[in-house]
Image (cartoon, rainbow, N blue to C red):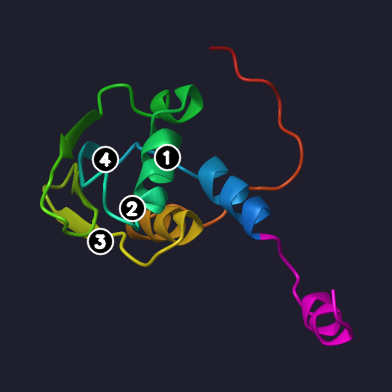
Amino acid sequence: MSQVWSKIRYGVRWNPAERLALATRALNLQKVKSIDISMDPLHHDNLSIRTFWHSIMAPKVRLTNPNVRVKTEIRNDRRGPFFVTTLDDGSKLHISTENMTAMDVIMNFNRLTGQPELGKAGTRPRAKI
C-alpha cells in the first residue's frame, strides 16, 4: 500500500464488515408485520438485498417477532431490487436498495422502524434457541 493510502486509511475509524455486524445485531422486527422482497437475480446490484434477506432470516432476528411474514418475489425485468415493509400501524416503507451497501440498507431499516442504527459492541450472553 502506498504512503498516501496508508495515511488516508489511518483516519478511518471503522471497518465496513464490523459496522455491518453491529447493524445486524440491532435488527428487531417487533414493529414489523410483513416484509415483501422483490429482486431480479440477474441484476448487477442485488448483493445488498441478498445480505438483508439473509440477515432478517437469522434465528435470533426471527425470535424478535416470529409472526412476521417474509415474501420474496423473483422477477426478470432488469429493474433494481427493493423491499416493502408493512408496520403494525399500517404504514408502508418502500426501500430501494440499488447502489446501497448492505450496511446502509440495514441501518436505514433500523432507523425507519424506530430501532438504534447500530447494536452494542462486545460479547453478549448466549441466547437459548
- Say whether disc 2 or disc 1 marks the residue closer to the N-terminus: 1
- Please indicate whether residue 50 sits to the left or right of residue 89 in the image: right
Amino acid on which the number 1 mark rests in the picture: Asn
Q: Position of residue 40 (x, y in %)?
A: 21, 47
Q: Tell me the SS state at disc 3.
A: strand
- Say whether disc 4 or disc 2 marks the residue closer to the N-terminus: 4
Spatial distance from mark 3 to mark 4, Cα to Cα?
18 Å
Amino acid on which the number 4 mark rests in the picture: Val
Spatial distance from mark 1 to mark 4, Cα to Cα?
9 Å
- Considering every residue shown, the one lying at the far top of the view is 129
- Say whether disc 1 or disc 3 marks the residue closer to the N-terminus: 1
Q: Which residue is mark 1?
A: 28
Q: Which residue is mark 2?
A: 113
- Say whether disc 3 or disc 2 marks the residue closer to the N-terminus: 3
Q: Which residue is mark 4?
A: 32
Packing grade of label 3 (10 A; few <14, some 14-19, many >=20) is some
Q: Nearer the viewer, mark 3 or mark 4?
A: 3
Q: Tell me the SS state at disc 1.
A: loop
Query: Is 16 a magenta residue?
Result: no
Q: Confirm or deny contact between disc 2 and disc 1 (CB under 8 A).
A: yes
- Say whether disc 3 or disc 4 marks the residue closer to the N-terminus: 4
- Please indicate whether residue 82 sits to the left or right of residue 57 in the image: left
Spatial distance from mark 3 to mark 2, Cα to Cα?
16 Å
Q: Measuring 41% from the left and 52% from the top, which residue is drawn there?
A: 48
